[in-house]
Amino acid sequence: MSPTALEDAALLARVGEGDESALEALYSRYGGSCFGLARRILDDAQLAEDVVQQVFLALWQGTGFNPARGAVSTWLMSMTHHKAIDSLRKEGNRRKRLAGEQTLLELQATGPGPADEAWSRMRAERTRDALKLLPAEQREVLLLAYYGGYTQSEIADLTGLPLGTVKSRTLTAMRRLRGHLSGEGVES
Amino acid sequence: MTTHDEWDELAAAYALHALEPDEELRFTEHLAGCDECVALLRDHELVAAQLGSLAHTEDDVAAPAWGSIREAIVGESAPVSLDAHRRARRRQPWVLGAAAAAVVIAAAGVVVWQTNGSSTTPAERALQSCRQQSGCSIIRLHASRGADPAVVLVSADRVTMVPLAMKPAPAGKEYVLWQLLRSGAPTPVAEITDASAPSSAGLVMSYADTAAFAVSVESAAVPPSQPTQVVAIGNTTA
């Protein structure tokens, strides 16, 4: 477990004891990332704020987080993603879902910032580089699902691909992305 | 393709929140009893979280300040600690004796669990009775393997779990029935002290806000704040 993950685990334990300052510390660390993700998916700051509130409320109430499933930071992003997609589907607002892929790949984070921001930029750059190494058709199914909020059945309808192809392509893309991010190269 | 390649496909799509509801249910049921899939999902969720990092750039609108959302999250109340949770549970009439459960079920028009003297099973009679009632909902709980262990009947803000094929809880353990809210939050509804008889309690939250019911195995000595080992789950039709 990384030092950051250990600190997060200690903060989480304090949250479980009702320590509001620990929750605030976790929000300070990850609230921006959660809000940024929700806003990117929903394209609406107010809806994104609602999502972030739901996520940290769940953390405060001690519901949903399972240490066996990974670190607090991963859970927060996963929870934010799920709730944002739920909100997107509920709102029925899919107008901008298809416009985002190229934007995501071209975004450049520049300029000075605090250490956490620098780390976020590095991580985003690394992820962006890894995504660019994927074949376009694999990248497409990943981003349609993650940022577009489409189910695999909907992606099959959109792309004209058989559902089985969408499923296998998604798994291959996730495995390859993991390989690129971990520096292990391409996994099949 | 190996058997677990199929589950791995579902795990990858689950991490992306891209499964249809029926597939998601199938996967979560399997996940409850499969350590290999827990590990697969952990890896996929890590990759998905990395994808999330692309969203945050400096030209974004700043996240709301803690002070502006604090009240919505924390309010004036402290989180539910295990001790507080235990005290709250003691205040709630979750655990009913067999007689009390029978009264509740009979009042709801559900034939109570019996062990002999009939050509139909108690569960079948309970299901039939519920079907004949207006406003009675039936939620069948599924396990990752084997027969469905129980059904949940919801009528007039009360929930009754009718065991179908539940073994007694292991020594020192007990079953707990959970209400899984659409918000994602699990809420304990009833301790199941007798796995061979119906257990009934009031719903903690409205049925309309409920996505699923689940049964978990928990330590009898330490009340849980979230499900530890889910053994059965069923989606609502609300």
Image (cartoon, coloured by chain):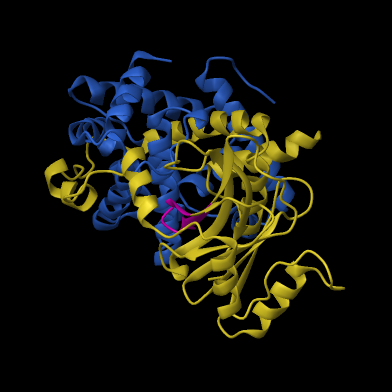
Chain colours: A blue, B yellow
Name, please, the residue furthest toward the left. B67
Residue A96 higher or lower than B143, as above or below? below
Quadrant holding the N terminus of chain A: top left
Task: Report if residue A128 is visible in the image.
Answer: yes
- Tell me the magenta residue range: B177-189
Residue under the image location 58 percent in, 50 percent down: B193
Q: Main SS type for the magenta part? A: strand
Please name whichever residue, B80 or A127, is drawn nearer the observer in this view of the structure: B80
Image quadrant of residue B53?
top left
- Residue B18 screen position, x and y as percent: 56, 50
Residue under the image location 45 percent in, 36 percent down: B222
Is residue B128 rendered to the left or right of residue B95? right
Quadrant holding the C terminus of chain A: top right
Task: Report if residue A121 is visible in the image.
Answer: no
Residue under the image location 22 percent in, 19 percent down: A115
Image quadrant of residue A141?
top right
Is residue B21 rendered to the left or right of residue B60? right
Name, please, the residue furthest toward the right. B119
Please name whichever residue, A22 or B153, is drawn nearer the observer in this view of the structure: B153
- Residue B113 screen position, x and y as percent: 70, 67
Image quadrant of residue A16?
top left
Is residue B93 rendered to the left or right of residue B59? right
Instruction: Tell me if residue B34 is in the magenta stretch.
Output: no
Please name whichever residue, A44 or A90, is drawn nearer the observer in this view of the structure: A90
Q: How many dots with numbers? A: 0
- Residue B101 screen position, x and y as percent: 57, 66
Please name whichever residue, B3 or A89, is drawn nearer the observer in this view of the structure: B3
Is residue A29 rendered to the left or right of residue B147? left
Residue A142 higher or lower than B137, as above or below? above
- Residue B234 screen position, x and y as percent: 62, 58
